[in-house]
């Protein structure tokens, strides 16, 4: 076994195709429904929000979809990303496990999110879109899309959850530096935002409300603006599969194959990005890698949610999908992993979890930051609070391997760095960070408002 630490691919190894799990998934995706009629949506309805190329990817069952050359050119700014063996963490844990991580924090915006932002901006530009609207929680997605829109000369309106807007000015400034306009949601710019403010003028905002505002801004623009989403949808998960395709080659360079692949889940995009190419190997080539999704205890949609049809947003304007959900108006506690505070989960991932192809666990905030700091001290990289959920689970796997005296090969996705999340680290270091259990009563109340759908699925 070599003592190599970094496994680096050449630019020529940059994937030429995205991998579409819907070609191989043993579970058929349920139809996406119109939020008004509750009937399956038509491409016409979706075309108000998305360009046709992305709608076709959303419903495609083709196994491989070619990555346009224009997108690959921009990917080259940071891809292929490095794979590292966390030798120093292994030593600190005194574990026989081998720990590898794919470092997606090296993108210019600091996370995996540009992998889809660049593709979405490209297809919008190609179809003549002039401006995009989107929402952002902690700001990782907003900065990724601001970066991408800047490269393709598109305007961008970002609805940023008010509490993050106030607490994280540096993410807002990064978005503005790339040229985006950023608004604290709820805003007085949309009917829905005004209605929320009329009821609760100090509303701190939520991802569900911000999605509603961004969707309304696009849907009422007479075609001038389209909407862009950073997770959950099939085409977003598709674009993220460059992570897993590269990781497969890099594990090969390391002469190992993972027993378990671990990633955090908010809407499911970075998990699917690394895990789906390994799931293909499980389904088609007899591999038996465990795929472990890690969510926060404050928003445990997979482990505590219900698998059913629900709205994607609070105002019930976005399409209805079948997913693991805590209810569309459930507002998770204000944990620092803002990107994991979503009530639902990607439909393809929900279906695969329901069918037993994927495992999931929920972890608490304090234990997550403890793991983040252990990782930062051992490996030097300060992880995003979201990514630290994967690190918590990785350390627990490595300690379990140690307890059982097993050599276990663990691969996790480091989805982003935490350089804009230092206030969260300060809260932890000063002993003020709290754990939050989700409220089962609040979830029950929210689930009582699920849409009544007459589709058997
Ligand atoms: C660094 C990072 N990791 C993970 C996530 C969770 O999103 P997803 O589940 O779509 O990967 C986010 C979302 O904002 C993020 O910023």
Image (cartoon, rainbow, N blue to C red):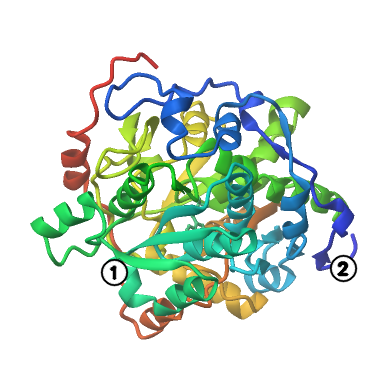
**Circle number at residue 163:** 1
Judged left or right of residue 220, residue 3 is right
Mark 1 surroundings: few (<14), some (14-19) or many (≥20) residues within 10 A: some
The CA span between labels 2 and 1 is 46 Å
Tally the marks: 2
Residue 241, given in percent of the width and then of the height, sits at 67, 44
Q: Determine if residue 336 is in view.
A: no
Question: Which residue sits at x=47%, y=53%?
Answer: 132
Q: Toward which corner of the image does residue 170 lie, by quadrant?
A: bottom left
Residue corresponding to mark 2: 3
Question: Which residue sits at x=72%, y=47%?
Answer: 258
Q: Secondary structure at mark 1?
A: helix
Q: Toward which corner of the image does residue 369 lie, by quadrant?
A: bottom left
264 or 35: nearer the viewer: 35
Placement of 11 over or under 432, stated as above or below:
above
Placement of 191 over or under 22, stated as above or below:
below
Residue 391, given in percent of the width and then of the height, sits at 56, 62
384 or 138: nearer the viewer: 138
**Mark 1 within 8 Å of ligand 1, using the beta carbon:** no
Specify the quadrant that holds the C terminus.
top left
Mark 2 surroundings: few (<14), some (14-19) or many (≥20) residues within 10 A: few
Question: Which residue sits at x=62%, y=75%?
Answer: 381
């Amino acid at each position: 076994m070599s003592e190599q630490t970094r496994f680096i691919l050449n630019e020529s190894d940059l994937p030429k195709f995205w991998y579409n799990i819907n070609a191989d998934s043993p579970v058929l995706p349920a139809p996406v429904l119109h939020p008004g009629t509750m009937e399956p949506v038509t491409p016409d309805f979706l075309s108000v929000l998305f360009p046709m190329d992305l709608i076709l990817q959303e419903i495609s069952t083709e196994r491989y979809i070619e990555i346009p050359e224009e997108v690959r050119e921009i990917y080259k700014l940071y891809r292929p990303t490095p794979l590292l063996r966390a030798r120093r963490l292994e030593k600190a844990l005194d574990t026989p496990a081998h720990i590898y991580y794919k470092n997606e924090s090296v993108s210019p915006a600091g996370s995996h999110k540009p992998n889809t932002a660049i593709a979405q901006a490209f297809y919008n530009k190609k179809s003549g879109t002039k401006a995009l609207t989107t929402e952002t929680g902690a700001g990782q997605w907003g900065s990724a899309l601001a970066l991408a829109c800047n490269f393709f000369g598109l305007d961008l309106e970002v609805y940023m959850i008010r509490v993050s807007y106030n607490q994280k000015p540096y993410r807002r400034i990064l978005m503005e530096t790339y040229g985006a306009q950023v608004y604290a949601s709820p805003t007085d710019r949309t009917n829905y935002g005004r209605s929320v403010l009329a009821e609760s003028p100090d509303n701190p905002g939520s991802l569900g409300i911000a999605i509603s505002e961004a969707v309304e801004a696009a849907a009422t623009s007479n075609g001038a603006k389209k909407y862009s989403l950073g997770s959950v949808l099939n085409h977003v998960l598709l674009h993220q599969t460059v992570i897993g395709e590269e990781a497969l080659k890099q594990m090969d360079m390391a002469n190992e194959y993972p027993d378990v692949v671990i990633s955090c889940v908010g809407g499911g995009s970075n998990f699917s990005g690394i895990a789906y190419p390994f799931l293909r190997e499980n389904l088609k080539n007899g591999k038996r890698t465990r795929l472990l999704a890690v969510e926060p205890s404050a928003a445990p949609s997979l482990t505590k949610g219900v698998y059913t049809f629900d709205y994607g947003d609070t105002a019930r304007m976005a399409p209805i999908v079948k997913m693991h959900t805590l209810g569309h108006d459930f507002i998770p506690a204000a944990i620092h992993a803002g990107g994991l505070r979503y009530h639902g989960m990607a439909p393809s991932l929900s279906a695969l979890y329901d069918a037993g192809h994927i495992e999931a666990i929920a972890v608490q905030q304090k234990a997550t930051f403890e793991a983040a700091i252990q990782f930062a001290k051992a490996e030097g990289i300060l992880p995003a609070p979201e990514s630290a959920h994967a690190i918590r689970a990785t350390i627990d796997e490595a300690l379990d391997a140690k307890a059982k005296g097993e050599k276990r090969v663990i691969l996790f996705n480091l989805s982003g760095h935490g350089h804009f999340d230092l206030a969260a680290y300060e809260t932890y270091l000063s002993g003020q960070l709290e754990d939050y259990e989700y409220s089962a009563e609040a979830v029950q109340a929210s689930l009582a408002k699920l849409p009544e759908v007459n589709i058997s699925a």
